[in-house]
Each structure stands twice: as C-alpha cells, then as structure tokens.
Image: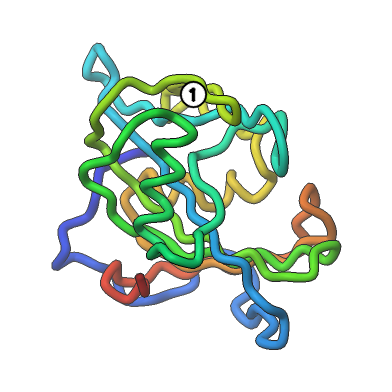
Amino acid sequence: FFSGPMDAGSSPAPHVHSGNPSLAPPESKPRSLSTLIMITRPKADGAGQEVLLGMKKRGFGEGKWNGFGGKVEEEETITEGAARELKEEAGIEATDLQKRAVLTFDIATLPRLLEVHVFSASQFKGTPTESEEMRPRWFSTDAIPFGEMWPDDVLWVPLLLDGQSFTGHFAMETDEKTVDHVLRIVPQESLRL
C-alpha cells in the first residue's frame, strides 16, 4: 500500500478519513509533546518497501514494535527532538525528515494529552543499531506486526506509508484500548512545526 510521498502540489483538501468526525481533544487537559519517526526504504529485491521499527526494551511501550521518538526537551524544536531521539534510539540520522501527522491521545489513565508529531524519512546516515531502549528491525510494509504494536497504529500507519498527511485524535480507556478516534487527511503545509 505504499506509493511514496505525494507531490507538494497534490495535497488533498482536508476531509475525514475515518472515525467520529465530532471527536476532538479536550482543551482543558495539558499536553505533553513527543515525536515519532518512521523510516522507509525500498526492499533489496526492488519489489516494495520496508519500514524500520524498534522493539521497545524498557519504559512506556515496553514489548511493542514502534517507530523511533520520544519527548521533546524544553530547549529544542519538535524537529530537533525527533532527530535526537532517532539518533539515541537507532544510531542513525535522517536526512529528509518530513512532517506527516499530528496525533493526540487522550488516555483516561494519564493526566496529560499526548501530542505526537509524526515524521517520515527515506534517506539516512549510519546503520540502524540496537540501543539500551530499542532493537531496530526492518519489516516489509505488507508484513507489519500490528498485533505487537499500539492498538491505534493499524488505523494511521497505513496512511503514513501511503504518503498521506493527516491529523488524528484517539480517545482511549487505557493505553491498550481505543474507544473512539478521528483521522483527517490534510495538506502537509497545514501541519504546524
């Protein structure tokens, strides 16, 4: 389902892709900023794409495959935070980061909304290397281990891998149970940095 990034001039008009169009994040809940990067590359045989995921070895999300990212520090921009986390967790530097999504997660058991800025990249320097926090592995985009990932990933990762730009909000009972969501396709330039 991966068709590569869309041309800058071909951004679709905003529209609801899936979910409850009236769902919105609560404005009164404080936000915690974080990042996530999905790295892709052509398969060695040229037939399709692969995505680099990391098995989380400790902390929030332990035991799940995920992209690379984490909290944004006070002194850095969101893009700088994304780049730093990728270097710390996988030992590589993306050279073509593109912001693709802003997702919010309202998990009933947490005091803050998680606001996740999602990036994609297909060019990088270095070799993905295991860190104390993540064990990287390439997966074919037609064999992504969604059963071992966050439950919402199956809803939005295909959009990202298809080159779409989007926003989303997920209402969750716990970090394992999504009770409602909305995903909106938006022009890439509308995603704030």
Q: How many marks?
A: 1
Query: On the rendered structure, is 155 left or right of 161?
Result: right
Q: Which residue is mark 1?
A: 136
Q: Amino acid at mark 1?
A: Pro
For residue 186, above or below residue 60: below
155 versus 115 height, above or below: above
Quadrant of image for the C terminus: bottom left
Which residue appears farthest toward the top when viewing the image?
A: 45
Q: Position of residue 21 (x, y in %)?
A: 59, 78
Which one is in front, 66 or 5? Answer: 66
Rendered position, 130 above or below 190: above
Q: In the image shown, does 113 or 1 lie closer to the viewer?
A: 113
Visible residue check, residue 147: no
Q: Quadrant of residue 125?
A: top left
Colour treatment of the image: rainbow
To which quarter of the image does residue 107 belong?
bottom right
For the residue pair 93 and 45, the one nearer the viewer reads as 93
